[in-house]
Amino acid sequence: MPAKGYAIGFLAFFVLAIGLVSQTGCSSQPAPANLTHGAASVADTPLMAAVASSDQGQVQSLVEQGAAINTLTEHGTPLALAVARGDREIAWYLLSRGAAVDLAGSDGFTPLMRAAGAGDRRMVQLLLSAGADVNAQADDGTTPVLGAARAGQLSVVKVLLAAGGNVNVSQDGRSLLMHLVAAGDLLTAEVVLAAGADVNYRAPNGTTALDLARASHNDDLQMLLLQAGAES
């Protein structure tokens, strides 16, 4: 019996994409699970318990018996829980059986936002391959790119930008670039500027990224912003 692992390569991504497109065209496959969106408590959702214990066999058994995959509980959906736990094998299985990749929790956070903020690059790639919205926005304005950038997850930021993530999003009146400058994150600021971030974006009070760099006396960031065309 092969050892259980978490490595999901590009082949697995292609298999998932093909499976999501063609799963209804193969009558020899088990009947699809209940994909209706609904709400229930964790206590009434055995599938959540199976995901929480990383019991892949039980997850498969429950799904094959018709357990609802897209049930939203106080701890999110089964897919969101698998993502939060970093369990790529269970996440892959749920997606292959029709889990709604962008079904958000009560705060508007999607599974991709959770994976991005946690810096789980391979989970991010898996969710993107399943069609996750790279520019979805939570109730507080968080997007996958914003979440990854503010958490200092540079490698994930690069993956999201390559997938079409918007570098000119804002949260709390500040642009993504401004948040990075305020945090002193020179490397990620460099990356988002190269991706087209607006160096002269102004917050509602008129503040720019350069103003923030000067206020923190960060010479490296000031130089970076000026070289990128910041208006002084």
Image: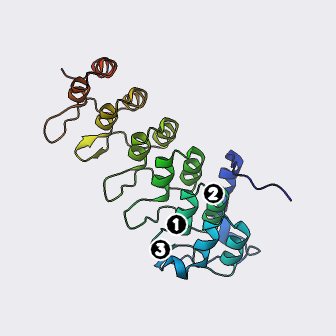
Picture disc at residue 100: 1
Residue 61's place in the image compared with 179, above or below, is below
Label located before the other in sequence (2 or 1): 2
In the rendered image, the residue lying farthest to the right is 1
Labelled pair 2, 1 in contact (Cβ < 8 Å): no
Question: Which-is-in-front pick, marks 1 and 3?
Answer: 3
- Amino acid carrying mark 3 in the image: Thr
The image shows residue 153 at horizontal and vertical percentages of 48, 39
Question: Foreground residue, 114 or 23?
Answer: 114
Q: Image check: 184 left or right of 131?
A: left
Give the labeled residue for mark 2: 87
Query: Residue at point 43% right, 64% down?
Result: 104
Which circle's residue, 1 or 3, is located before the other in the chain? Answer: 3
Question: Mark number for residue 73?
Answer: 3
Quadrant showing the C terminus: top left
Question: Mark 2 against mark 1, which lies toward the viewer?
Answer: 2
The 10 Å Cα crowd at callout 1, few under 14, some 14 to 19, many 20 or more, is many
Q: Are marks 3 and 2 in contact (CB under 8 Å)?
A: no
Name the spot of residue 37 as percent of width and height, x first. 48, 76
Q: Quadrant of residue 191?
A: top left
Which amino acid type is marked by label 1? Ala
Q: How many marks?
A: 3
